[in-house]
Image (cartoon, coloured by chain):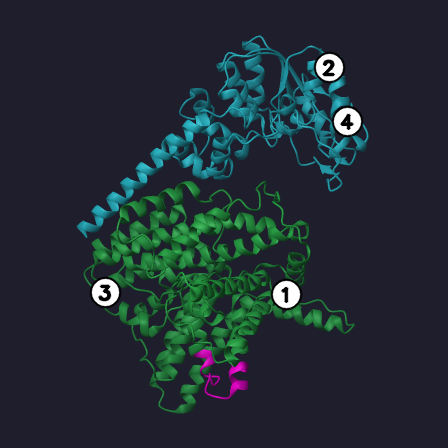
Chain colours: A cyan, B green
Amino acid sequence: MKQFLIFIGKTLLILLCVVVILDVLYTSVYLQSSTRGKIEQVYNSKSQKFDVVILGSSRANNHFVTPLFEQKGLRAFNYGMSGGHLFEASLLLKLMIEKKYVIKNVVLEADLNLSNEKRDEGVSSHFLPFLHQSQTIANHFSNETDFASMYYVPFYRYVAFDAKIGFRELFNVVQQKPTTLLDNSGYYPLYKNPKANMKNDLTNLKPLKNKYFEEIKQLCKENNINFIAIMTPMCSNTKGMNYFEKVNKLYPEIHNYENVVIGDQYFSSCGHLNDAGARKFTSVVITDFF
Amino acid sequence: MFFNSLAFAVFLPIVFILYWFVCNKNKSYQNALLIIASYYFYSCWDWRFLFLLIFSTFLDYYTGIQIEKSSSKTARKFWFWLSIAINLGFLGVFKYYNFFADSFSQLVNGFGFKTSPLLLNVVLPVGISFYTFHGLSYVIDIYYKRIKAEYNFVDYSLFVSYFPLLVAGPIERATHLLPQVKVKRSFDYQKAKEGVFQFVWGLVKKVVIADTCATYANAIFDNYPSMNALSLVLGAVYFAFQIYGDFSGYSDMALGMSKLFGIDLLRNFNYPYFSRDIAEFWRRWHISLSSWFKDYLYIPLGGSSGGMAMKIRNTFIIFLVSGFWHGANWTFVAWGFINALYFLPLLILNRNRSNMETVGLNWNFSGIKVFFSMLTTFALTCLAWIFFRSKSIEAAYEYIVRMFSNRIFEIQYLENQRYNYEIVVLVVAFVLVEWKNRQQVEPISGKYSYLRLSLCLVAIVALGTYADYKEFIYFQF
């Protein structure tokens, strides 16, 4: 038995060495990556100057046409992330401030994402390679239930989120495989989708006094950034449209632009404008705010 | 509680420590601990079905004793058939009732009547097919006086409910397992070490091969109408490795952990994809089930003793029943039928026992012949797996038709944002490792075992699929 316990001890030691070495290796690779996604790009960048930074979910990513801001002479980047919640938007802004970005305006898409304060596991996992390098990221995740495992167990975060930051993504980073996420200054255009679901039901959604919305607002105030929060359009076949009124009751400062693009021909799916719709929408926003 | 879960990683060491450090005085303590652990393990799936398991155990225990004690032939028959009827009754109600009710309703509706089947809202108890077959083999063996009835209920319960084999086999025989649980087990370092190696290799098969192949196979099978020929071929190959990695990986883990408790279980897989014909494949795939059907169905039906017609009839019966054992769906029956068809030429030409020795490859004409016979057998197997994996026979048929008629062999981007060819290298590497080590149970032991172990641990940690978590396929059976 003693021999067996020594064998198990050695096996566990090998396992420990394996996870520590892999953790160091993966983290080192991600620390060199700045062309595969918006989070890596911000984390691995130096100070930058922006007139407009756009934050939010896919409804920011697909709705704010960054080149239209640029045509107006504004240096802009769309940091909206498909699937992302305000948890990630807030952390990304914190990182930009940590990296000493100089930002004049933050445009935040704040509508459906106000209804939850949870993190999106897929999007937020892209912050995790830098968990030990950035106190900002560690603090932001510190209240999450799996924080201890992610922070203290070597390589755990790469195993738990292997679909996003596992071997496959690592391999793509090493190969410097291009993505389209950073094209068009971060704006991702959608087009007509014949299979799209052109209906939505918001009746069960309830806007919250959202912790991360408050954080973003506060960060902007502290760093003299003009904060513009905007609600973006939905298709005509949407139930529970009074959601947007509820948001306005809770947060009168959020501009209701839900109805500035009317007509389903401007939509790729019920919650997402197509490129033509996005251009129409962005033009109105630029006219009104810039 | 899956074998590859964190909960099990806590459960197993606790049982191991209690087994060897607290309950090691005699076999009664050892067995009592294992049975408590097994019932706890099973109740983690669904505690309500624990009562069914205990009832099923008690039924076979009691009827086994009654069969042995009965002096009259009629009484023996009565207890025997009572046990068979109740065991198969449970299986019928939980596993097959809805299928038969639905199929009957469809048949009647086909004649122009309008009926809707009365379906039961029941969940399939995990492992029911496996522990029912344990009990059945035990009762049948007593009835035919091959073994003596077991009078110690704890020992018998352990034979049925031993946690490494409880939910997905291997299907044990009383003649093999009961003698082991009747004696006190002493710790054997070599056996325990082999057990760890086998468990680790099983984990590699499950999380690195099966679950990774599953993400690709699912993306292809679930969207087969939009897939090109190359994707469809790869989909079938990936599924072949998914199911092999999944089930043989589970079996390796079961056998490996059982060695930690000093108990040997029956080998369930013996590198089936290196078979040179279908008969050899079935001697190497799910061995405990194949041999169960051979001993308790094929031979009682007359086996090979009658003429060719009888051999063919019996072969079709066992393949169809084997298919049906896997699940209540016509796709499994079709899968069994196709395998029976594959078997037919070998049976007629009397070549079903021609490849009994371990396969080897030489750089000559015979080596090429062996290689192509293995490739052909694998291709035939993959074709049959399409029926096993598809949702319906029509879907399987369309899949195959599209595979042969589409003629586009281009790299295709799948719905899960991966390219269809991406894991070919992984599959080929796995095949090479298996080929090199086909003479042994797992590839870790031997020279440089620590280096091999380290590589396996790296593969499990770095290449395993965890986020797209998959259950073990055979748990549903």
Q: Which marked residue is nearer to the observer: mark 2 or mark 3?
A: 2
Same chain for the residues at labels 4 and 1, yes or no? Answer: no
Q: Which residue is mark 2?
A: A286
Q: Which mark is residue B27?
A: 3
Magenta residues span: B296-314
- Chain containing mark 4: A
Q: Residue A145: x and y, percent?
A: 45, 33
- Chain containing mark 1: B
Q: Which marked residue is nearer to the observer: mark 2 or mark 4?
A: 4
Same chain for the residues at labels 2 and 3, yes or no? Answer: no
Decide if residue B265 is on the left or right side of residue A121: left
Q: Which mark is residue A276?
A: 4
> In what element is the residue under mark 2?
helix
Q: Residue furthest top?
A: A224
How packed is label 1: few (under 14 Cα within 10 Å), some, or many (20 or more)? few
Same chain for the residues at labels 2 and 4, yes or no? Answer: yes
How packed is label 3: few (under 14 Cα within 10 Å), some, or many (20 or more)? some
Give the spatial CA distance, label 4 vs label 1: 51 Å
Q: Nearer the viewer, residue B237 or B124?
A: B237
> In what element is the residue under mark 4?
helix
Q: Which mark is residue B119?
A: 1
Q: Nearer the viewer, residue B308 or A94?
A: B308
Magenta-colored stretch includes residue B50: no
Give the spatial CA distance, label 2 vs label 4: 15 Å
Q: Is residue B183 above or below residue B23?
A: below
Q: Is residue B104 above or below residue A255?
A: below
